[in-house]
Each structure stands twice: as structure tokens, then as C-alpha cells.
Image (cartoon, rainbow, N blue to C red):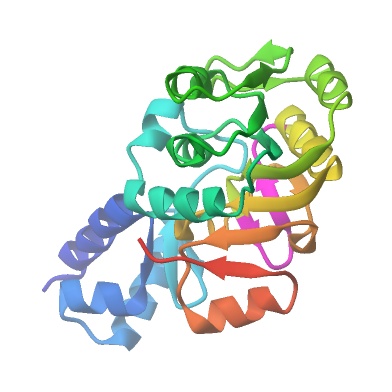
Amino acid sequence: MLTSERHQRIMDLIKQKQTVTIQDVAVVTGASESTIRRDLTELENRQKLRRIHGGATIHKQISSESSVGEKSAKNNQEKTAIAKHAASLVAEGDCIFLDAGTTTTKMIPYLQGKQVTVVTNGLTHMDSLEENGIPTYLTGGYMKSKTGALIGTQTMETLGNYRFDACFIGVNGFDITYGYTTPDPEEAGVKRTALRLARGKYVLADSSKYQGITFAGIAALDAACLITTLTDEHMLTALRKQTEVRSVSP
């Protein structure tokens, strides 16, 4: 296989899976792992991807953010597995904060019948919350048209009126050095506020978010329990030195 063809296969695989291992690429291309490492380094130098331990992930600008529609089309099985596990941690009668996001949206059907009360800044959650008969308080604030999230000073002031048994937060990346991050500083502020006001603190992030670093810091890893579909034992061991990690399978 020509180098150019191999590079195209690598890029097609990364576009499909967001994050790939060297072994994934070796199976698809039939090349040796040493060849794949050289390919990944060359593609990273051309800013086509970003190297991570044991593989690579899609290259993104640190301030860029996908729309709800784009996010909803990615990693659905992983997000559902995370959401189902997260919902199992909610006790009967809890008052919880559900952050705006596509993974937290998937929690809602699993909350039905638990007699919970939800506070959320996610406009896209509202139809599902109503359909499942869940009492809900919607924060005020400025609406981000791209994601349907309510953000800003008014949102944080509203949150300050509540205390939560648990909060469930989405992130755009989690990294051992840089912690949890998101592209929007105002949205990061809302997430930090919710974490501060909750007893149980959970971050929901599928494996594609591993070693993702975006513009605005939310908190260090130890600020919340991480629920993820990451399965690589080396990566999980490193993460567990800093925080509680719950690894779930799709």
C-alpha cells in the first residue's frame, strides 16, 4: 500500500471513530506498528490529527465547538452506556443538575419513575423531560444558538439558589495535566458553579474526549468522578491516580 493511500485510510478511520489506537490502524492498513507510528507523527506535523498515548485523535482548534446536531451523530452507543450508568447513581427523590449536552440528554429516559427534580441549563432537554414527566426548573441566561445551552451571569445566579444531591456535567475534553475543559469560558463558569453546589459530582465523557484540550478550563480531574467508555488499562490507571473513574462498556 502506498504511503498516500495509507494516510488516507488513517484519516478516514479517525473521522469515523474520532480516536484510534495504533493497533486499530495496523489492522485496517496491514502495516507494522512502527510504520503506523511514523505515519501518525507525519500527519500530526501536517496538523491532520493529534497524537495521544497509543494512538491519535481528530485535530480540532481549541476554541471550536460542534453543534448539537453534529454531537448527536457521534458515539451514540458510548453516550447511551454512560448515561444509563449515570442515571443508576440517582436515588429516589434526588434533586439534580443536568448540564446541557448530548450525553446528559440520554440520561432522561432512565430517570423516569424516580421522583427526581431536575434543574438544567439545557434547552434541548426540555421535550424529553416533559415527555418523561420529570419536574424541571430551567435556568435563565443567554442562549447559545449552536448548542441550546443557557450561560452567563444570570444562569450562575439562578444556580446559586439551589443545592443538588448530584450534578452531571458534560465536557469537550479531559486530560491528566489540564483536567476538564470546554471551548466557551462562560459555559465553563456554569459547570464550575454546578460542581460547587452539588454533593455528588460526575463528569460524563466518552473515550473520544480523552486527552482533548479546549480553550476554557472547568476544573481539575479530582473535582468530579469521571464516567467514561475509555477501556485502555494504562490510561485508566493514570487517570485513577487523580480521581475516581467508572469505566462502562457500550
Name the residue rendered at 72%, 17% in the picture.
139
Magenta-drawn stretch contains 201? no
Magenta-drawn stretch contains 176? yes
Percent position of residue 102, x then y: 47, 36
On the question of residue 59 being in view, the answer is no
Percent position of residue 31, x then y: 20, 82
Image-based side of 121 in relation to 10, left or right = right
Judging depth in this view, the residue of 233 and 163 nearest the camera is 163
Percent position of residue 242, x then y: 75, 73
Looking at the picture, does residue 116 appear above or below residue 46? above
Give the magenta part as a residue range. 174-184
Judging depth in this view, the residue of 224 and 44 nearest the camera is 224
Name the residue rendered at 69%, 42% in the picture.
215
Name the residue rendered at 60%, 33% in the picture.
115
Image-based side of 175 in relation to 195, left or right = left
Percent position of residue 200, x then y: 75, 52
Q: Quadrant of the N terminus?
A: bottom left
Q: How many callouts does the rendering have?
A: 0
